[in-house]
Image (cartoon, grey):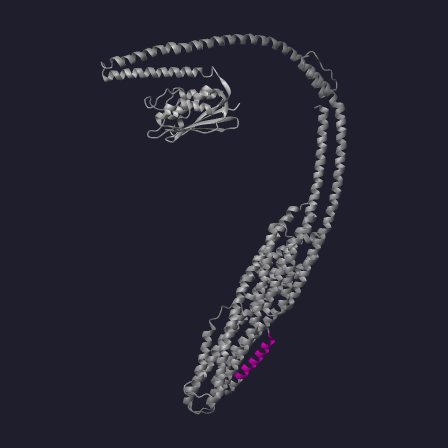
Amino acid sequence: MRISRKIGLSFFITFLLVIFLGGLSIYSLRHLYKGLDQVFSKELPASRITYQIAISMEDSLSELNNFLITKNENFKINYERSYSQMQDNIASLKNFAALDEEKALFEKIKELAGDMNTIAVAIFSDTLKTKDLIKDIVKLEMKYRDNLYKLFDFEENKMLSEKDLLLVNAQRIPASDLIIKAKSGLSDIMDSLMRYALSDKEKEPAFFGDKLSGLDKYIKDYKNYHGYALSEKERSAASELLTLSGSIKTQAESIVDLKKNTKAQLENLFAKEKEIMDTLDKTINLRKSRISSKLGIGNALTEDIPAVHSISKIEKDVTQSWRLSGKYILTGDDEYKNSYYALRQAIERELKDYEAHARLMSRDKFLETIVQADKGIAGNISADMDVFNIREKGYKDIISMKLDLQKKISELSARNDREIKEAKEPGEAFSKLVSARWILARIDSEVSDAERLAMNYLGDQEKAYKGIYSELYFSMKKHINAYRNSAGSDKDIGPINEIESGLDKFNSLILNVMDSHDKIIKERGWGLIKLENELKSNLQNEVENELKQIEKNKKDIRNRIATINTLIFLIMAAVAFIAWFVVFYTTKSITRPIQELHNGAELIGRGDLDYRLNIKTGDEIEELAEGFNRMAGELKGLYTNLENKVKERTQQLAEANEALGRTNKELDDFTYIVSHDLKEPLRGVKAFSKLLIEDYSGKLDDEGKEYLKTISDSSARMTRLIEDLLNLSRIGRTKNIETGIDINEVLSDVKKNLVYALEEKKAELILKSDFPKVTCDRIRISEVFSNLVSNAIKYTKKDTRPVIEIGWSDKKDSYEFYVKDNGIGIEKQYYDRVFQIFQRLHAKGEYEGTGAGLTIVKKIVENHGGKIRVESEIDAGSTFYFTLPKA
């Protein structure tokens, strides 16, 4: 190809390359914009919806939390609204689930959300049932207590009207003790039941049947007390107590079953919540990885898209922190408290990280509003948890104070009973002691009732419980004053004053616990909800601002891409003009002298060594022309000198060929001498030794016969050595190479020639089918196979039938043949030695042969352009491989 064309082609290729790169740039920009469009229309909305699913899920579960804490059914309505929003978000997410992985995650989210709702609905239902059952059992308890108080009054009047002090001590006091124990036992049962029903920390109480049976025994013993005649009213009240006991037992068992079920459902709900949150996180991470793979064309845009994820995650984590605080207040489990504070630290870090972006986008003031609102909510939640801790501690103090009061009342009652027993005769002092006894019994009962009313209020927030408690407290104070008025002596005033002081502290503790609970309910019901909704609105506005900024940046990128495309087209046009100018210039100033140089070179190449170039360009091309002229002059001198040397070398070659002819003739003469003159004396030695053996063996002793046999065998071996040596010297001197030699036929002839040797050793010769046709000297290749098979027959193990296999394989440029046996094998160190002339690995008498067979085989194979090798293992056999070229 002409240089001008090459130069033109090179510039044309350069131009095409520029066009290609320009087109590739345009395509890349369009592709990136398309990817960006997919991010904005699919990946980013899908991510945002996934965050909203997580947020609405935490909202709905927070409503469930608030319901369980407050028992306010408005939170059930709020839960249903949040769950409905969650379902709408899940339905929206379905539109973005295209790939199998996305569909699998979506189906799992949908399934888990359904399971979570099923559990939540069951918890709502069971909690409301428990609430109703508690109201019912409280009513039953009040009826039970009223009937006991009737019996209290009956017994008090009887004791006051009884004149026989022995009868009082023997029957009235023991009988009255039974109904006092019944009231105390009922209080214990109801206390443990209410604690279990209204708290998530209490263990399941012992079986109520046994304890209620104990109560029934007290009433039955009272009813059937020996020698003690009861009135019809007393028997009726006692019978009603037994009936009420059965109803209380039924209600208590139902409450325990519902509470156990609710606890199990809550644990299941928490597990489902974690599982669905993990699945949502996987979905978000999948979307984020896809967004990352499709971004990268502008910091402005890539800055805002991660910012949407950041603010969405802040929104999710904030909602989740509210949920964790509710879990702690609901269960009192420190694990949720620790998780809440850990998440709060993460939120503060996230807000700090987002602050740099907000400052860059001039929205730092708005972010400050969010931060302050978040801190306000966090402060309120921390205060709530502190109040919760105060409430829990206060309730423990209530129980402790109750036990202390009951202990003091019990001690005072015991002393009072002793004084009754020590009384000598009925009278005013005795009447006061009897009245005091029943006053203490009522105070003891009312202390238990007070603690339980506090528990009922914490569980139900019924204002009526507060009113009942106030009446109960004033009743206790009234009974304290009544006891003080009926005290038999001044020594009773001190203990009753201690009891009254303890009762005042007891009252303060109960009121503080109720106030703490009211604060929690108020915050959960109104304060926190208002603050949370305000923060949610601010966070949502921040997300919308980020999305608006992304849309604006998207338009900016579109305009930039259009500008870049225009610049690329202008650059391609400029490159095309420059390429055309360069081609035109180079054709004029470079290619013409080069063409003259080319023409001169052709003339010199055709033998016109007298031709000289005449180029005057003043540059490298002129220097090149002068070099050509010098080269032509030198070539002419070299050509003349070369002709003389060729004549001289031709004469020397003729003389060498003549000397080689004489050498070949001398070699043929040597071959004749060896084959005739050397073999002739050997034949004489062999013949005479044979005659001596046949005619004079009778005259020779055994030693003489052995000597003659050795002479005969040595002469025979010498003959074979000479024949092998002559055969080796003739290999390569004469060749009869033919094409299309069928190896199948060659092996068939070899098998026929060796049939007796094979039968003698009972050897099995296995020939693989479909051997190829090759180009070779048929006789020599037949000799190769014969030698290898003979060796395989010869070197067999004793008591082992020889098995010989001949096969082949195609090796691209050659055919590889092999002869495999199961003989004695060859050690690896002797692989090369076996191919050397007259080299034997065994004693002469052990195996026949001269040691030249493998040397002949190797020389034949190498004269055909092939190679031979051996692989062997002692006592396992040997395999000889040799190749023949296909060509």
Horizontal side, residue 876 vs residue 260: left or right: left
Figure disc tally: 0
Q: Position of residue 398 (x, y in %)?
A: 53, 73
The residue lying toward the viewer, choosing from 728 and 769, is 769
- The vertical placement of 296 against 757, above or below, is below
Residue 282 to residue 862: above or below: below
Q: Is residue 26 above or below residue 544?
A: above
Q: Quadrant of residue 18?
A: top right
Say if the magenta span includes residue 478.
Answer: yes
Q: Nearer the viewer, residue 414 or 296?
A: 296
Q: Overall secondary structure of the magenta stretch?
A: helix
Q: Give whichever of 465, 89 is nearer the camera.
A: 89
> Looking at the rendering, in which quadrant would you find the N terminus?
top right
- In the image, residue 436 lies at what x, y percent? 49, 85
Pick whichever, 682 or 426, lies toward us. 682
| Residue 352 horizontal/vertical position (percent) | 64, 55
Q: Residue at x 34, y 12 (%)?
A: 683
Residue 10 image point, x, y percent: 70, 29
Answer yes or no: is residue 502 visible.
Answer: no
Q: Is residue 840 magenta?
A: no
| Range of magenta residues | 462-480
In this picture, residue 556 sits left or right of residue 504:
right
Please indicate, yes or no, whether residue 551 appears anywhere in the rendered image: yes
Residue occupying the point 72% across, 49% down: 553
